[in-house]
């Protein structure tokens, strides 16, 4: 895909018609999700950039596209840099660009459906700081010039069975309603589709890789929910599943329904809810109380049924991945003579193995299958154009996951094709040391992921190395593969890790133009009885992911006795879990792949 | 000191006279400093509580005193709990108490000189959330009933010589003024006395342990400063030192001078500047721009002259402490027969040794000399009433520091009196492992102290233990022993550690009723050349403090080879630094105390 100059010209003409000097086009849709429906792919339509985060901005005859460190290479391949100047979203932020380009008194517009209140405030600060005025567009000018913009998605919505959800929607709603009452709140407006899917125990298919229906909802302090969702997505079965407490209404009625909250105290999350909802509620005379989406924390803290589902899903998913790794080892060697296996062929086989599972519903994100230098492109996606062969002496990084009815998986393995160099083994071992340090951590209740982050980086730092991405993200239960509020990251985050949270453990190292290394397992937070002075409750991680880590890439001498013991015990668990379900050849391969170091 | 019921009654009567339902008395003065002059000891006067942080609040016939974890024991010794209910300032915060006690429509007052804007906002949220109204007092009602309230201090102000400051005030002012111009600001209002002392290269003596004059200042974008300081503190010498760019004016003229900034963009720090300054500037028609005090970061990042001074001060201070530790070892043994050495006697001898130094000016804080269970009281101060003997089989924790013309020191050593128990040695060794892990850390530019904090706790956590205080605070250059903006702490803090910053490294462990352990050195951030892939600038710490760490408390088997190597190298440095300056007996003691493990 490349930038189409006509689209930019049409948008400029529309801005001029409206008397606006500037406009910003974010990747976000109304729901701030990672995946957006085709209708909301405004950034890609305008610029050609297909990454999962970013924005474009236009001021007069200038235009720029802002992307983060994951996409600095990709943006130059996808976007016509004569039309859009690529900029690093944090080193060269939009605010600086607005300050430089916006004329004094200039009118800079944005779509208040696509910006959370916090984002809108930051934008306003930038625009006003540049001496301009921020304009909230009543309708999106890009939509006005996008003639063949797709319609909103209408995938059918299905009940999410209690056998997987573990708690009835009615109970969840009653608990949240009681909390609203305690806080003297009459209602909470929900704009995050995964919050709504969790609350109502429903799943859908409006976007790729995440089984959620796009919708808005209002939760009242008596547990009733007004659900603003397209009627085409509903069925009689679903209506029965929802029960009397949920009133389905067309999305077009949503804003007007907010006016009915006049005079009431209403909870809204400034970090995720569209700015327009705040404006509308306040204009209607509601008292907006700003606070976190009330579903986020209970959703992140999985119940016993969800955890049992996660363990089962990971056993099956790890089995598929183990079969794939064994197959890859054989095939890469066999095809070395005729130029090697391709990235696409490898990813396709892994997909086939996952699809065999009857509970499999989708991939949890587009598989990253990067050989050699592609491995160093942190969010590389293989396409027919980019596809390359796995060659001897290279590393192959494969980051993939599945959506199963009982759980969501996300796993990265990096394997040697042929014989690795000493430098590859050194770097792999440093990443592994970080992975093990985090996996083994024991920490007091109240500890946040930010506090733990350094455990995954410390070994790399001692060698002057690091990686430019987070160490761990929350993971949903047959929901988003990236969910909050917890996070393991360099960035400050004060959400305490709590038993039942699922989070990834994924340190890496990337040598641009050469190779990428990442070792990712999902873990869940558990109680950690054991030594102590009785004054604190201690927590730890249980690793969920069960697939071998490439022993050929490990420099054993760099590992401590405790690190070796962890890896050997992990591999013994992997072997014991999968051995019986595998064919003889694969079982033999696994035996060797999981032998003690 | 105990609570005087008459004072509380007088204050209640004054509140009633003014028609106020509640009032809050913080420990802070106008300058948010750790040490306040006698005039500002309102919290101690009212309640008897003498800790360095906290607040009291009165609503109707209820009163409470709010203190942090350091002071939960002390507050019960000092305060009459029938008059003031002691509450934990974060677990049972003032906001909860206001919500419970303030009648709907109640008027709750505060002194806007004693609250930063951020603090005032939080207070307003609590009061309004409780259905009340927050009133900014025009004058402090406690001052109105404190008949013999001391006058403001008037200690003479002295020039801080360029040989210690390393950069002329004129250059500092020019650099900050250029920065104001770049940010389109006309002036910055300074309320932190250590910022002003740094900027003007002056030192004073208005409060204990910190050589600073209390004052306010306005820095203009041409480098001129309006300094609002009591004329009694000035001398002809000082005026000459200040030069033409600094206009001294009486403090009484300060608020009126702010009115002169009408129509201008003025920088003010909402985290430290009194709320009244914001009100006054905005009422006068100035445009207040909220941002960090512009002196904080350059002050924290010591220049080469200041670092040379810090190293020299630490050599001498470490020499005094080494002599003390040798003396303590002999005396504690010698006096064991007649009941032991007392905490006060020990602290007095250490003080004498420090005072011998010609550059010594003061202690940097009140020495903590806690034997046995006193060591577990994190901010214990010995008094004639609390004094106890150092007894065989106990630990003695001594945290102390000096103010020297060339630098500020802060060091804690924990030593065994007689034979320690195995449990003491285990705990000491875990604390030492944390201390060494932080001392040895190598980290990329951009890393904050929050990210490193866990290094100091990790070994304790694995045994289910922790400590309830920060790991490291910034330290000034012949200025405050606690300064920002950097910090090593569990709490989120996004200030990157930069070369030249000085920070403490002080993990600990406390067993209530038994003993306390803390090992504290000051360190400075330095460049760390060495291994890397060339993509990042790496930093590390240089330890400044030079005094032996008690080898008798170390379980060698718990240390790794790298940890032993660090300690042996540190001890070799201590020995090499001090050996020549010591008498024969002390040198022999040091030889043994610093022998390789």
Image (cartoon, coloured by chain):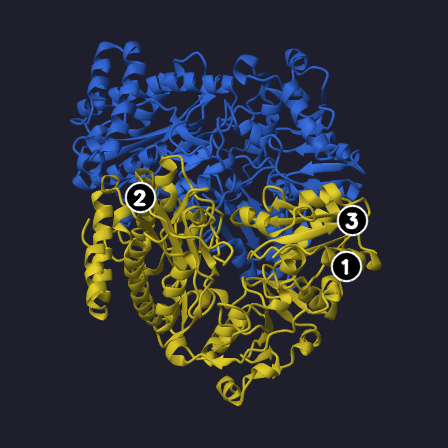
Chain colours: A blue, B yellow
Give how far apart the Cα atoms at labels 2 and 3 are.
52 Å
Tell me the SS state at disc 3: loop
Towards the viewer: B202 or B584 = B584
* Of the image marks 3 and 1, the number of the one nearer the N terminus: 1
Tell me the SS state at disc 1: helix
Towards the viewer: A210 or B427 = B427
Crowd band around label 2 with a 10 angstrom C-alpha radius: few (<14), some (14–19), many (20+): some
Select label 3 or label 1 by which is in front: 1
Determine the chain carrying the residue at label 1.
B
Q: Report which quarter residue A471 is drawn in.
A: top left
The percent coordinates of residue A456 (x first, y second) are 35, 40
Q: Which residue is mark 1?
A: B10
Tell if the residue under mark 3 belongs to the same chain as the one under mark 1.
yes
The percent coordinates of residue A22 (x first, y second) are 60, 54
Select label 2 or label 3 by which is in front: 2
Extreme-front residue of the structure: B338
Determine the chain carrying the residue at label 3.
B
Q: Report which quarter residue A197 is drawn in.
A: top right
The percent coordinates of residue B585 (x first, y second) are 21, 64
Residue B198 visible at all: yes
């Amino acid at each position: 895909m490349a930038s189409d100059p006509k689209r930019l010209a049409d948008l400029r003409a529309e801005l001029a018609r409206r008397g606006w000097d500037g406009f910003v086009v974010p990747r976000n849709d109304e729901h701030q999700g990672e995946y957006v429906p085709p209708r909301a792919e405004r950034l890609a339509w305008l610029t050609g950039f297909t990454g999962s985060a970013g924005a474009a901005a236009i001021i007069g005859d200038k235009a720029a596209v802002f992307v983060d460190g994951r996409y600095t290479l990709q943006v130059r391949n996808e976007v016509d840099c004569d039309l859009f100047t690529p900029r690093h979203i944090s080193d060269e932020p939009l605010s600086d660009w607005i300050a430089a380009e916006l004329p004094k008194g200039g009118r800079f517009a944005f779509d208040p459906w696509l910006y959370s209140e916090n984002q809108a405030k930051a934008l306003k600060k930038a625009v006003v700081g540049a001496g301009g005025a921020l304009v909230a567009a009543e309708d999106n000018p890009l939509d006005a010039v996008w003639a063949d913009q797709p319609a909103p998605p209408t995938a059918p919505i299905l009940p999410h069975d209690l056998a997987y959800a573990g708690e009835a929607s009615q109970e969840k709603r009653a608990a949240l309603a009681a909390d609203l009452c305690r806080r003297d709140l009459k209602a909470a407006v929900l704009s995050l589709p995964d919050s709504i899917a969790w609350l109502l125990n429903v799943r859908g298919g409006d976007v790729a890789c995440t089984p959620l229906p796009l919708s808005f909802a209002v939760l009242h302090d008596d547990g009733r929910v007004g659900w603003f969702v397209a009627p085409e997505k509903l069925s009689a079965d679903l209506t029965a599943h929802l029960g009397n407490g949920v009133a389905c209404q067309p999305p077009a009625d949503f804003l007007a329904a907010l006016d009915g909250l006049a005079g009431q105290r209403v909870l809204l999350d400034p970090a995720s809810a569209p700015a327009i909802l705040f404006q509308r509620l306040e204009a209607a005379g509601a008292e907006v109380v700003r606070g976190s989406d009330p579903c986020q924390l209970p959703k992140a803290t999985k119940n016993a049924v969800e955890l049992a589902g996660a363990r089962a899903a990971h056993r099956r998913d790890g089995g598929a991945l183990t079969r794939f790794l064994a197959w890859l080892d054989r095939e890469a060697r066999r095809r070395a003579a005729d130029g090697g296996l391709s990235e696409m062929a490898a990813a396709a086989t892994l997909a086939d193995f996952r699809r065999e599972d009857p509970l499999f519903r989708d991939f949890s994100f587009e598989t990253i299958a990067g050989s050699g230098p592609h491995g160093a492109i942190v969010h590389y996606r293989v396409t027919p154009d980019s596809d390359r062969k796995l060659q001897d002496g290279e590393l192959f990084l494969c980051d993939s996951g599945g959506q199963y009815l009982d759980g969501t998986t996300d796993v990265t393995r990096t394997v040697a094709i042929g014989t690795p160099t000493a430098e590859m083994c050194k770097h792999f071992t440093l990443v592994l040391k970080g992975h093990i340090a985090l996996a083994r951590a024991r920490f007091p209740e109240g500890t946040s992921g930010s506090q733990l982050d350094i455990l995954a980086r410390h070994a790399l730092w001692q060698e002057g190395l690091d990686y430019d991405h987070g160490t761990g993200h929350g993971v949903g239960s047959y929901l988003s593969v990236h969910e909050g509020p917890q996070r393991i990251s360099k960035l400050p985050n004060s959400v305490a890790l709590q038993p039942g949270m699922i989070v990834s453990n994924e340190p890496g190292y990337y040598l641009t133009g050469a190779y990428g290394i990442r070792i990712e397992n999902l873990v869940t937070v558990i109680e950690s009885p054991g030594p102590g002075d009785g004054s604190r409750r201690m927590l730890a991680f249980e690793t969920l992911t069960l697939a071998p880590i490439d022993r050929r890439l490990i420099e054993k001498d760099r590992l401590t006795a405790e690190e070796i013991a962890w890896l050997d015990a992990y591999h013994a668990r992997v072997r014991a879990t999968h051995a019986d379900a595998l064919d003889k050849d694969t079982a033999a391969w696994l035996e060797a792949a999981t032998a003690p170091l």
